[in-house]
Each structure stands twice: as structure tokens, then as C-alpha cells.
Amino acid sequence: MSWDFLVTQFGVQLGMWWVIVPAILLGIVVGAVPGFSAQNSLIILLPLTLSMNIHAALAFMIALYCATHLGGGIPAILVRIPGTGGAAATTLDGYPMTRKGQAQQALVLSFCASVFGGLIATLATFALLPWLSKAGLYLRSVEMVVVMLFGLTLIAAVAAQDFLKGIIAGLFGLLIGVIGTDHIYNAPRATFGFLELYDGVPLVPALIGLFAISEALVMVETKMIVSREGRERAERMRWSDTVDGLRMSLHRWWHIVWTSFVGLVIGIIPGAGASVAAFVAYQQSRLWSKTPELYGTGIPEGVIAPESANNGVTSGTLVPMMALGVPGGSTAAVMMIVLQYHGIVMGPQLFTSHPQIAYGVFVSMAVAYIFMIFTILPLARYMSRIVLIGTEYLVPVIVLMTIVAAFAGRQYLFDMGLAVVFGVIGYIAHRTNYHVTAMLIGIILGPLFEEYLVRALRLSQGNVAVLFSSTLGNVLWGLLALSLVLPWWRERQHRKAALRR
Amino acid sequence: MESNDDAQGRTALGADLVIPALALAFAAYFFYSVRGLAWEAQANGLLIGSALVVLCLVQVGRIARAVAKRHGRLGFGSLIRPREAFVKRLGIVAISVAFLVAIRWLGLTLSLFLAMAGALYVMGGRTRRHLFWIPLISAAMAYVLFIGVLQSELPPGPVEHLLAPVVAKLHP
């Protein structure tokens, strides 16, 4: 990768301003609506992104993804309702600042931490990417089988509330991913007699059902996504003290830098995501503070840490997707589906076969953050009013428009029905805490997992012991076993402690 | 949200069995569908399916133990409560299915308009203005995006036939 290539990429991405600016505005709105996440809006807009050229589609998705993380902090600060899971930790000090009459300062702190935290993490990822991408080349079929199982286990361990349920969801997804004809003999398996399933389970309807429709079905039971108290608070918002907020941010620049790295590292772990990163960064910030007792009373560091970390996650999440072909989270999974639709295969080869895509993603992210600096400050105040939309309008629009969007991928009416089926399964999984992200990532990894597994088994003429034949593979198996045992042990310790109390 | 616990503080755990039951049924169907195929076509499914069956049985055992110890009961509270929301949910799913059937005859625009109006009504919308304008705007947007711009092969209906000359002029 040369400087010329980098400068050209930067120029190409800057030329995408016509896609990036609307995506930022949309992302901020989407981020501010609780229960409406980046992946949901990407799903609704799938037909649009699938029809764009690959560079424009990527720029759009990346800008929307980053802006959503930023937008989630707005209602978290103003009305104590986090727009996204990643902004939950922001409420701890953001809302007390609002109550102290420092709402605008808190918003500006949040924007600065988000934009600069995201930018710093993106540049760091960009610098490390050549090494990270080469790591993928050392992985053969055997190791890839373990890496995929490891990713799935981590998602279940970190993201799911109940580890066993997370693993069941992941394996269920993996088995659904095997539906269709096998790679060698083209023999159909578990297709329920539908010709439309011979090519495997289409990812777009699975995604739409498991995320958008299921969340809309959960939303049905509330009149509004905010309480009456939250609504009254949202209607009273004012815009002031922006300069003071900027000054506070500048004074705490080092805090933004190191908490963004916390986000980056956590983002690289599949399944960890923005919520975990934000809380870890908040805890670490408090741990190293000279005045930990002030956390929770409305101090700038308490807003900076989670916001900087949850934007640091954005680039980290894409690393396992680009380098290994294993999506680090649900939004990365959506992006992977769009890239696959355009014929781009994720994994270490991506860096040699399509360097403009592999590096372009991160250049695009950096450009999106630069654009955000200029768009967000004047517009933020008005965005918080989005929380005032009633679910009686949101639910029908989400459900029916996403069902129509399910048609876009393959142009089959069958896929629209499949989205409804996955919607019902996703709703049951949602309500009973079987993690839908683990299920979706299982469905995505299913065909790849089979390809690597069968390749490894064929090389060893069907001997399963081949899976334990490499040193790196065995280390990964050990880590996998640890990640299975640790949550169980931790749960046991918690239960014992609770009983003692 | 209503509580998932009964008067004795026992949690309704029956709903937690739905996903394992679906997974077990699917695994059984998968094993049935791959019988007689070459080992390469069976290996992956059998490996994942077997692990899934074991874990589902562990989960069933865990729930059975909780029920036996009277910490839980076999209710479906978390899925069907609150009752009025459950009725709305069923209504939305039924309208979605009806939409999928109707789209073949009425085309995208008209079927989406009717389904959106029905869904808004089910969700509690009673204002005639909302029941007309929201479906109209949604259907118009869907028409412009999917048929006008993306030229999807969604089934045509009366509205699409009526507007076909306009689209043909835009995409000669």
C-alpha cells in the first residue's frame, strides 16, 4: 500500500460526499430512536445499497453506521433514554449534566468524543491493518473451523445474557446455514421441498426477520418508545453553551485518545460490541480517576469515556470481518451480506484481490468522521424530538416496508414469506433471551464453516482427528474451551455470592 | 410490561422451551433429510446437529429441574403477555401474511396501501387522516423506490398497470 494509493482512496471517498452527508443525517436520526439500530436501518435500506455501486454502497453504510453510534448519545444525555445499547453508559453522567443545566456542554462533549474517538481508532486500525490482514493467511481449513466456532462462542459468552441460550442460538443458526445443496454432490438437504432453498438460506430475509420484524413485534406493547416524563423532557430542550463544551473537550483530549483504544480493542472481539466497550471504558476511566466519587454526578469524563469507546468500536468490529471473514457484530454482518451480494469475498485474500475495498472501508470511515464534525454540531438539538414518534406508526411501517425490502436480494416472493417466518422466530428468541445476533452470525457462517470442515476432513480422508492436528488450532481449541468454561464458572461464583448475601 | 412471575414468585419458563423445541425438530428433520447421502454431505450437519441436540437437552433438563424445585412453572407468559399486545402482534403477523397473498393479485402498491391501513388500525390508529395518508405515502414511496427506480420484478397490479406508460418513458 503506497501513499499514492492512500491519497487516491481519500480523494475517491471525499467525492462520495453526496452519499456520506445524507447517511450521516439519517444515522443520527436512527441512532436517536431507541430500539432502532444501525443494522435495522441498513436492512430497510438494503434495496438501495444493493442497487448502488459497491464504493457508494460502502460509503453509505459506513457513514450511517458511525453516525448511529454518535446519535445514540443524544437522547441518552437529554432524556436519559439511550438511543443505542452503546449509549447506555452515557446516561450515567450525561443526564446528570443535563439536570445541572449543562445539556449542551454534555452534547458537545459527546460529539467531540464520538468524532475524535472514532477517528483515532480508525487511523490506528488503518496503520495495523497490513499486519492484521497477514494473520489471516496463516490460517488453514482446520484453524478456520476453530476460529469460526470461537467467534460464535465469544458472541454467546459476551453478548448473550445466558451463555447456554447464546450457544443454542448460534448452533441453531449454524444448522440453518447448512440448508441447501452440499458443495460436492449438490444433494439437497433440509430444504422442506422448496426449490428456493437449494442455494441455501438467503441472508437478506433472515436478517430482516431476525432483527427488524422481531424488534417491531416487541415494540408493539408500548404506546411510545419514551415514557410520558421523557416526552415532556424532550419537548423542553434548548441549545446553548456549545463553545463551553468544546473547551471542556479540548482540555480532556488524552481521555478521548485512550478510551477510544479501549473501544478499538473490544471491538475486535467478535460479539463484544459497543455496549460492553462503553461500560468497560467508563469503569476504567473511573478506576484511573483521581476523583472516582464524582462519577455519576455529571462530570465530563463520564460522558467522554463511553462515547469515545463506543465509536472506537466501529472500526474494531470490521477487523475480523475483513481479515478473517467472521463478522464481529450484527452491523458488520449486514455489511458483509451487501459485499457478498456484490461478489466480494471476505478474508485475507481481500487485501490483495480488492485492496480498494479492504482499505477503502477505513478511509471511508475516516472521511465520514471528518464530515460529521461539520454536520452534527448545528443539527443535534432538533434530533432528540424523534423520540416523540408513536409505535402505532413505527410498527406497521417497519414491518411492511422491510417485508417488501426482503424481495430485493433475489427477486423471489418466497423471500418475503421467509422474512415473516424469521420474524416470528426472532421475536420468540428476543423475548426468551436466545441471542438473535448469535443466530444470524451462525446462519452467515454456516456455508463457510461447512466448506472449511469438509475440506479439512477430505484431506484427512474423513479422520476427525485432523481438527486437532495443528499447534495454532490446538491453542485456539484451548481458548475455545476456556471461553466455554469461564462464563459457567463465573455464573456459579455469582450464584454462590448471591446465596451468601 | 407485566410480570413474568406468578403469585408464588415462580417464573414462567415454558417459553424458554420454544427455541430448543424448534431446534430439536429441525435437527431431527435435518438428520432425516441427509440419510443415505455421501458422508461429505452429512458430516457438517451431523456434527452441529448432535452438539445442538445435546445442548437443547441440557436446557430442557435445566428447566425441568427448576420446575421440579418449584422455582419456575411451564407457562408462556413472556411470549403472550400483555394480552392486548399479543392480540396486536397476532394481528400484525396475520396482516403480513394477508399482504403476501394479496400482492400476487393486487400488486405492490395497492396491497401495501391496504395492508398498511389495516396494520395502523390494528395498532390503534383511528384517525381517518392517518389511516389514509400514511399508507398512501408509504405505498407511493415503495412504488417510486422499488418499481420506478430499482425496477424490481414485484407482481404488477392495477396501479402498476395504470402507471406503466410513465415508468416506460423514464426507462426507455
Image: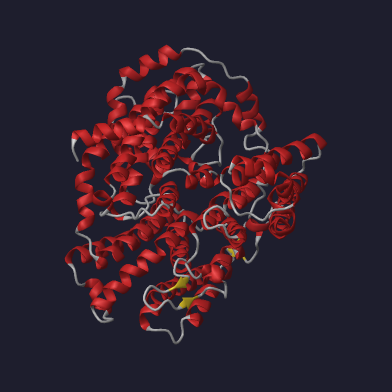
- Relative placement, left or right, of B145 versus A344 is right
Horizontal and vertical percent position of residue A201? 50, 64
Looking at the picture, the colour scheme in use is secondary structure
Q: Which of the two residues, A341 or A72, is positioned nearer the viewer here?
A: A341
In which image quadrant can residue A478 be found?
bottom left
> Residue A457 appears at what percent x and percent y?
28, 76
Give the residue at x 47% y 59%.
A439
How many marks on residues? 0
Residue A311 falls in image quadrant: top left
Residue at 47% in and 21% down: A97
Q: Is residue A399 visible?
A: yes
Q: Quadrant of the N terminus of chain A?
A: top left
Viewer-proximal residue, A11 or A289? A11
User: Between A305 and A335, which is closer to the camera in this rendering?
Assistant: A335
Is residue A91 at all visible to an observer of this figure? no
From the viewer's perspective, is residue A140 above or below residue A337?
A: below
Give percent across and percent down for residue B28.
51, 78
Q: Is residue B158 above or below residue A149?
A: above
Q: Where residue A415 sits in the image (x, y, percent)?
A: 58, 60
Residue A312 image-quadrant placement? top left
Is residue A175 or residue A192 the one in the foreground?
A192
Vertical position of residue A125 compared to residue A231: above or below? below
Query: Relative to residue B148, is residue A336 drawn left or right?
Result: left
